[in-house]
């Protein structure tokens, strides 16, 4: 198998494992747990220290303690003084991107881990997940989240599951390491997603199973459209079809033409299904590199199916950790994380991925379809410990995101796996310690915040790569325009240099008129690209492993830089390493700086850990879609899970606090 196919097969086998682990545990037991008052944004519950992390946890890739060496200062070092000549309006910026939404970076959540990350069912939502999504939605607008992946292909919507669960692995076959778990799920999962949408601005991508197109299972599309309504963005049809043959899911010789034909058969089946009224929202071809998108388009794919296609998509990881994650699985030598660390720490990293898709992006633009990087992260087969979970990955995510935005991708979804992965933007604690530990927020989550603030909520953001510092790959910079006018500048410094000598000063020079008196700057900071814990965005942090309830902690710090209006310049310092986001107008700043005056009822408490739940009554009265149709669609057996020790604490007061127009934060009152 190719490394890529290995990557996917290996991920599938990890997911089998995760699904098995998940099936045997129960969370949400509040008995005897310490309760802590929820304060303002500085409250965080328990603080885990290194010494409190037992070895079995540290052995899980998601919680590893590997800290690499930061790469040496490049030689020659990038010049540390340079000028950026900025045009005031897009009229003078040929080649600027299409208009982008603020939540350009969303998430791809493997279907089999949805019940760990999003919630257990429609009445048990993970509050940290809601907080994280709310934080992005406040800054950039609706957050796109895909629930799917390899597991979607073998998933089946059923009326009920015997033990009352909403999602479960159907049968266990560990004999084949590439086995994809066959999932069964009930419409409860879709109600769960809709309840998330009702609380925070999340919209969903799902996938229609494509494992057997002559025996289709369209239940997810029927229930998805009925329950999610406008909260559904679209359905992927075929996840990485270029790897089907390697995975044994299609016979040798199955090719782009076969994909074209099977795709057409599903479109026909959808057209014949009165319960699938929306028929223009399919996502394809979602190839991962074994086929080029163009080789699929060469079949006449786009014109043949343009009425059904809502989006064009690809999936890509720039490297893989398969040899190390699955010893003996490949003849390739295990990658040494330290060796590949520098690959992520320059503007070449994003450009080398995106350059392969410039043609596709322009085809998509001509076809009038948004072009999505549907699944991506630092490296497949779990990422590289010390790389994927370092501040370097946060810088990589910011620059890669901006490169994609500049090159007319419309969205990119950062993949979320489980405890076997080091690249997760967020990871709940293993379920058997979910009452004593909180979530781990990965560095790449900070990338999603920075991009959301860089692009903002107007839906008019246009991005231009400034070729900063003579195109120096260690110091990329971007101008962001809104409504045609310069709004923000984003500057990256990939170098680590504690001496301060590699801190650079970018002199923003405004070509004629409109020189601001001062500008505001937010920094994404850490002492080194190898840092894993001490990461801050505008002074705020999610803390280190097991410390987060999904809210930023600490006081926000925004720097003010006085400009030289005579010279028409503002000098911005960018430490090594850092990202600086410069706000050129007050609205550019205010639009993405939610009020930090969230307050809570003094009776609102949460227990240590992440397992606070949302009160069902609050959800039932919230403004979602078609909650009233529930009985028509679902015969989920409720309350059959039995043992009282497994029952949740009864939430007595769900607190949903709206501060000002934009600020939304959730917490829970538990009575015990
Ligand atoms: C604690 O940190 C030390 C070094 O800082 C590291 O060697 C050790 O593995 C860590 N232990 C755990 C359990 O994370
Ligand atoms: C931005 O979001 C709007 C509303 O969801 C959508 O119609 C539009 O296509 C999005 N733009 C891009 C570039 O994805
Ligand atoms: C497709 O997936 C379903 C559900 O897991 C399974 O029952 C069926 O056998 C699969 N079909 C093929 C051809 O693999
Ligand atoms: C796929 O295989 C069929 C049968 O061999 C062949 O006719 C067709 O041209 C192939 N399509 C592509 C895109 O290679
Ligand atoms: C992105 O689209 C715009 C048209 O809106 C075009 O001018 C620009 O060249 C495109 N960028 C790339 C890299 O194709
Ligand atoms: C949780 O499960 C792990 C095995 O996955 C075990 O080593 C550990 O002791 C358990 N911890 C508790 C608190 O039950
Ligand atoms: C955290 O990092 C900042 C730089 O980003 C540094 O100034 C500060 O001293 C660090 N704090 C700790 C506790 O290491
Ligand atoms: C945050 O700001 C408040 C009010 O200005 C102050 O009382 C508090 O000490 C600050 N907290 C930190 C961690 O700096
Ligand atoms: C949320 O879930 C509850 C319980 O299943 C359901 O009654 C309610 O209608 C749901 N709300 C929405 C907005 O879907
Ligand atoms: C959600 O799961 C919990 C715990 O398993 C269970 O008590 C509750 O009844 C479930 N809710 C629904 C709507 O199925």
Image: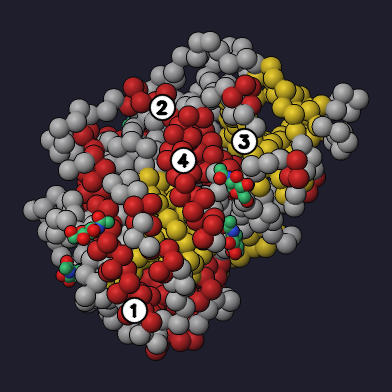
> Up-down: is 309 above or below 39?
below
> Up-down: is 355 above or below 594?
above
The reply to whether discs 1 and 2 touch (Cβ–Cβ < 8 Å) is: no
C-alpha span from label 2 to label 3: 20 Å
C-alpha span from label 1 to label 4: 34 Å
C-alpha span from label 1 to label 2: 45 Å
* Among numbered discs 1 and 2, the one appearing first in the sequence: 1
For disc 1, the marked residue is: 268
> Dot 4 lies on which element?
helix
* Among numbered discs 2 and 4, the one appearing first in the sequence: 2
For disc 3, the marked residue is: 465
Foreground tag (2 vs 3): 3
Q: Position of residue 655 (x, y in %)?
A: 59, 65
For disc 2, the marked residue is: 343
For disc 4, the marked residue is: 354
Q: How many other residues sit within 10 Å of disc 4, few (<14), some (14-19) or many (≥20)?
A: many
Colour scheme of this structure image?
A: secondary structure
State the residue at coordinates (58%, 76%).
623
Q: How many other residues sit within 10 Å of disc 2, few (<14), some (14-19) or many (≥20)?
A: some
Q: How many other residues sit within 10 Å of disc 3, few (<14), some (14-19) or many (≥20)?
A: many
In the image, is the residue at mark 4 within 8 Å of ligand 5 by its beta carbon? no
């Amino acid at each position: 198998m190719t490394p890529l196919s290995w990557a996917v097969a290996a991920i599938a086998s990890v997911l089998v494992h995760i699904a098995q682990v998940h099936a045997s545990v129960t969370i949400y037991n509040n008995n005897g747990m310490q309760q802590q008052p929820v304060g303002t944004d500085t409250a965080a519950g328990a603080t885990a220290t290194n010494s409190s992390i037992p070895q079995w946890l540290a052995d899980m890739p998601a919680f590893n303690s590997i800290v690499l060496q930061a790469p040496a200062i490049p030689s020659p070092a990038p010049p540390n003084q340079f000028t950026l000549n900025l045009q005031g309006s897009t009229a003078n910026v040929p080649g600027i991107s299409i208009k982008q939404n603020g939540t350009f970076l969303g998430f791809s959540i493997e279907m089999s881990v949805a019940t760990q990350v999003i919630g257990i069912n429609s009445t048990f939502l993970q509050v940290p997940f809601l907080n994280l999504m709310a934080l992005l939605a406040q800054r950039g607008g609706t957050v796109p989240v895909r629930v799917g992946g390899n597991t979607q292909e073998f998933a089946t919507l059923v009326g009920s599951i015997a033990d009352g669960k909403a999602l479960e692995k159907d049968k266990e076959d560990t004999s084949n390491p590439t086995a994809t778990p066959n999932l069964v799920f009930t419409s409860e999962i879709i109600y769960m997603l809709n309840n998330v949408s009702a609380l925070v601005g999340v919209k969903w991508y799902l996938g229609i199973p494509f494992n057997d197109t002559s025996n289709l299972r369209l239940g997810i599309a029927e229930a998805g459209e009925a329950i999610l309504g406008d909260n559904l963005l679209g359905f992927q049809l075929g996840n990485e079809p270029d790897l089907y043959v390697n995975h044994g899911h299609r016979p040798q010789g199955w090719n782009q033409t076969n994909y074209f034909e099977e795709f057409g058969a599903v479109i026909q089946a959808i057209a014949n299904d009165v319960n699938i009224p929306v028929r223009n929202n399919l996502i394809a071809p979602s190839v991962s590199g074994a086929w080029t998108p163009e080789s699929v388009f060469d079949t006449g794919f786009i014109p043949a199916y343009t009425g059904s296609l809502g989006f064009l998509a690809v999936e890509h990881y720039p490297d893989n950790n398969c040899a190390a994650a699955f010893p003996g699985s490949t003849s390739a030598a295990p990658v040494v994380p330290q060796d590949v660390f520098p690959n992520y720490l320059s503007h070449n990293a994003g450009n080398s991925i995106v350059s392969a898709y410039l043609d596709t992006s322009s085809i998509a633009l001509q076809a009038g379809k948004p072009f999505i990087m549907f699944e991506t992260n630092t490296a497949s087969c779990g990422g590289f410990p010390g790389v994927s979970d370092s501040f370097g990955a946060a810088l990589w995510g910011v620059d890669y995101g901006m490169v994609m935005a500049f090159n007319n991708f419309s969205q990119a979804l950062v993949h979320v796996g489980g405890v076997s992965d080091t690249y997760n933007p967020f990871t709940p604690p293993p379920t058997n310690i979910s009452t004593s530990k909180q979530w781990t927020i990965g560095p790449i989550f900070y990338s999603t915040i920075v991009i959301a603030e860089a692009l903002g909520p107007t839906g008019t953001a246009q991005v231009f790569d400034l070729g900063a510092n003579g195109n120096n790959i260690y110091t990329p910079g971007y101008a962001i325009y809104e409504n045609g006018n310069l709004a923000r500048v984003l500057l990256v410094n990939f170098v680590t240099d504690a001496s301060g000598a590699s801190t650079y000063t970018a002199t923003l020079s405004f070509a004629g008129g409109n020189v601001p008196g001062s500008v505001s700057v937010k920094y994404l900071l850490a002492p080194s690209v190898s840092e894993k814990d001490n990461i801050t965005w505008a002074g705020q942090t999610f803390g280190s492993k097991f410390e987060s309830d999904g809210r930023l902690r600490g006081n926000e710090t925004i720097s003010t830089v006085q400009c030289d209006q005579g010279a028409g310049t503002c000098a911005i310092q960018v430490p090594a390493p850092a990202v600086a986001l410069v706000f050129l107008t007050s609205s550019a700043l205010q639009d993405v700086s939610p009020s930090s005056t969230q307050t809570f009822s003094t009776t609102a408490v949460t227990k240590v850990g992440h397992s606070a739940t949302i009160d069902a009554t609050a959800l039932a009265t919230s403004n979602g879609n078609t909650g009233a149709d529930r009985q028509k669609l679902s015969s989920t057996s409720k309350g059959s899970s039995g043992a009282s020790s497994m029952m949740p604490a009864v939430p007595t007061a769900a607190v949903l606090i709206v501060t000002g127009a934009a600020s939304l934060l959730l917490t829970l009152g538990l009575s015990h």
